[in-house]
């Protein structure tokens, strides 16, 4: 997106802003250090190896806190708050590790008359979405967008709620959200994992995740996934934790109060 914006003679004018206005590409994470050390640093390293961003459309190498490009384009990292990127003209927002933002009960930051729980990622997402709408709305179409990234944690996490919303919108013919859930081995380079697999049944409300041996008679095949044999020892030691961290599937809890749910 920075490349595409840089190809425009005057990006601000093209997006309906005053000519020469700065346009920002913002990365938001749980804290500023995480935002700088994660997404932004990786993007800087990728761009440093690109002839286009090194020669044709280079960023300022002496500025370490952000990426400054010609034509008023800039990319930087901020900590998660409703004041993130306050006053800036945002074209693109990346919210990283969205499921790890704090959820505070009885917070003073909650809106009066609303829920007593302050969900930080929801507040940040809504505020930045409103800012995109106010800056880049052209006849009902927003010329910017948000990228939400996170590992899965628990059922009804923020990304799961967004997935549900996306499916409901798609059923109405409203294609506003692109959603993908990947397993670790789905995005790995060819040859990284062995081709042989073993079977794991993902847990639900009535039972824990488990590595299948073939002798079970009560298997829910709809919940079975094939996992590369490289990860078998890890799954045998901590099935629920590995289902979450490697397979990208949320689980009820890593250390539930009642561990043997199948006995209830």
Image (tube, rainbow, N blue to C red):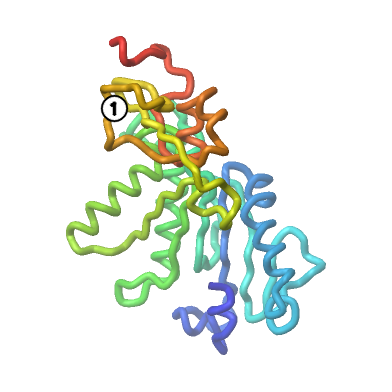
Seen from the viewer's position, the closer of residues 156 and 235 is 235
Residue 152 is situated, as x and y percent measured from the top left of the image, at: 45, 39
Q: Is residue 120 visible?
A: no
Q: Is residue 36 visible?
A: yes
Residue beneath disc 1: 219
To which quarter of the image does residue 45 belong? bottom right
* Residue in the picture at 50% in, 84% down: 13
Side (left or right) of 48 relative to 94: right
Residue 133 is situated, as x and y percent measured from the top left of the image, at: 39, 65
Residue 219's place in the image compared with 188, above or below, is above
The local secondary structure at tag 1 comes to: loop
To which quarter of the image does residue 8 belong? bottom right
Seen from the viewer's position, the closer of residues 54 and 109 is 54
Residue ranking furthest to the bottom? 9
Residue 83's place in the image compared with 75, above or below, is above
Residue ranking furthest to the right? 62
Labels in figure, total? 1
Residue 21's place in the image compared with 201, above or below, is below
Within 10 Å of disc 1 (Cα), the crowding (few <14, some 14-19, many 20+) is few
Quadrant location of the C terminus? top left
Side (left or right) of 252 relative to 27: left
Residue 52 is situated, as x and y percent measured from the top left of the image, at: 68, 80
Seen from the viewer's position, the closer of residues 229 and 201 is 229
* Residue in the picture at 45% in, 27% down: 240
Residue 15 is situated, as x and y percent measured from the top left of the image, at: 46, 79
């Amino acid at each position: 997106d920075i490349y595409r914006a840089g190809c425009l003679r005057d990006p601000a004018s093209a997006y309906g802003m005053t000519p020469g206005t700065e346009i920002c590409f913002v990365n938001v994470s749980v804290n500023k250090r995480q935002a700088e050390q994660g997404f932004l640093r990786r993007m800087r390293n990728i761009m440093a190896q690109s002839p286009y961003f090194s020669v044709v459309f280079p960023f300022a190498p002496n500025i370490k806190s952000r990426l400054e490009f010609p034509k008023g384009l800039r990319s930087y990292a901020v900590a998660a708050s409703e004041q993130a990127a306050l006053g800036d003209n945002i074209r693109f927002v990346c919210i990283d590790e969205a499921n790890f933002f704090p959820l505070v009960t009885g917070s003073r930051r909650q809106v009066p008359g609303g829920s007593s729980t302050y969900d930080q990622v929801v507040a940040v997402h809504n505020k930045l979405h409103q800012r995109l709408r106010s800056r880049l709305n052209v006849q009902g179409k927003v010329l910017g967008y948000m990228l939400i990234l996170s590992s899965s944690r628990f059922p009804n996490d923020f990304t799961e709620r967004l997935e549900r919303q996306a499916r409901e919108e798609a059923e109405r013919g409203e294609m506003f959200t692109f959603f993908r859930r990947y397993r670790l081995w789905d995005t790995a380079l060819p040859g990284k994992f062995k081709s042989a697999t073993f079977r794991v049944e993902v847990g639900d409300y009535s039972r824990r995740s488990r590595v299948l041996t073939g002798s079970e008679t009560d298997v829910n095949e709809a919940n079975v996934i094939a996992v590369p044999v490289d990860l078998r020892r890890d799954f045998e030691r901590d099935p629920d934790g590995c289902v979450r961290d490697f397979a990208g599937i949320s689980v009820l809890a890593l250390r539930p109060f009642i561990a043997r749910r199948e006995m209830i």
